[in-house]
Image: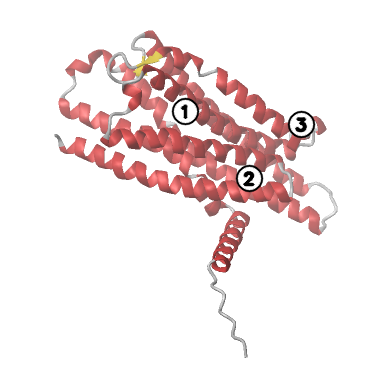
Amino acid sequence: MSSLTIIQQNVARYGLSTLLVLGNVGNLFTILILSRSVKQKLNSCSLYLLAASISNWIVINTALMSNIIGIDHIDPQHTSNIICKLRWSSTHALLMLSRSFMISACIDRWALCSENRTIRSFSQPRQAIRLIIILIIVWTIIPIHMAIFFNNSSGRCIATPGTYAFFYAIYSLFIIGILPLLLMIVFSVRAWHNLRLARTRVAPIGTRHMRIHKRDRDLMSMLTGEVVVYCLTTLPYPINLIYSVSTDSFAVYKSSTRKAVESLIGYIISPLLNFMYCCAQFYVYTACSRKFRKEFLSLFCRQLQDGNRSIQIPLPTTRN
């Protein structure tokens, strides 16, 4: 066994296990904090972020868990064709739901500060709930092609070699890489622009007005951090996929060292970086938003106090 193979196994064993712990802790805290925020004041952007957190948490405890089990045991997706198809199509649906919710949140922030009343109407909780339901239906249907053309006839669960493999590489480049990132960047930039314009408009400067803009800037900072993390963790995947498909025809001429290097790089890109995006939300929000940090500390202190009260042992009373 080469040293590169050993490195890849250690990256898989310790890297994915670390992501499982950090992802569960982070997403559960994010879900609790955003749920409290939505209960206090229903906000369309918070609904999108909450839906994205739930999608990420499900991915972590299904697809990521399956990858960890497959390190030291036989991965069922390589032995069962049904699990192979369900695994790829359902994971893709959940990941794309998370990305779509983030795009919707960026559009929501842009719409909120628009001068156009029709556009502003998009930034409403009822519109958010409606769009979340529509996106769930859409991303349940779109990955059907993966359930059809992914199989484990070669001994591994992969896309059918040939035309479909090339189609899937191009599909991934645009649907996973370029399109979500482009939409996130465009609407994030436009949202910041609209927010600056909104601050310069003639309006009564009251305490409530200042609180609204501070909350909106906070949400925009959180979304901007998410866009940066998405770019760093997700864009390499379709690029590497296209490289793999393009060089597949002369794979027999590759040296064993080159194959080991490509395998290691491919594993770092997917699943490690792909799952890292699902685990990073809480830590990005904590770093970018002062309000989110305060909410987290408040929640943490409350849980700590509740825990201390629950373990208090009543002292016995004595009678005179």
Residue 133 in sight from this viewpoint: yes
Judging from the image, what secondary structure is the residue with disc 1 in? Answer: helix
Judging from the image, what secondary structure is the residue with disc 3 in? Answer: helix
Tell me the number on the disc at residue 91: 1
Q: Position of residue 230 (x, y in %)?
A: 49, 37
Q: Earlier in the sequence, mark 3 or mark 2?
A: 3
Q: Which of the two residues, 54 or 110, is positioned nearer the viewer here?
A: 54
Q: Earlier in the sequence, mark 3 or mark 1?
A: 1
Residue type at mark 2 is Met
| Residue positioned 50% across, 15% down in the render | 144
Residue 284 in sight from this viewpoint: no
Residue type at mark 1 is Thr
Q: Is residue 55 left or right of residue 39?
A: left
The reply to whether discs 1 and 2 touch (Cβ–Cβ < 8 Å) is: no
Considering every residue shown, the one lying at the far bottom of the view is 320
Q: Earlier in the sequence, mark 1 or mark 2?
A: 1
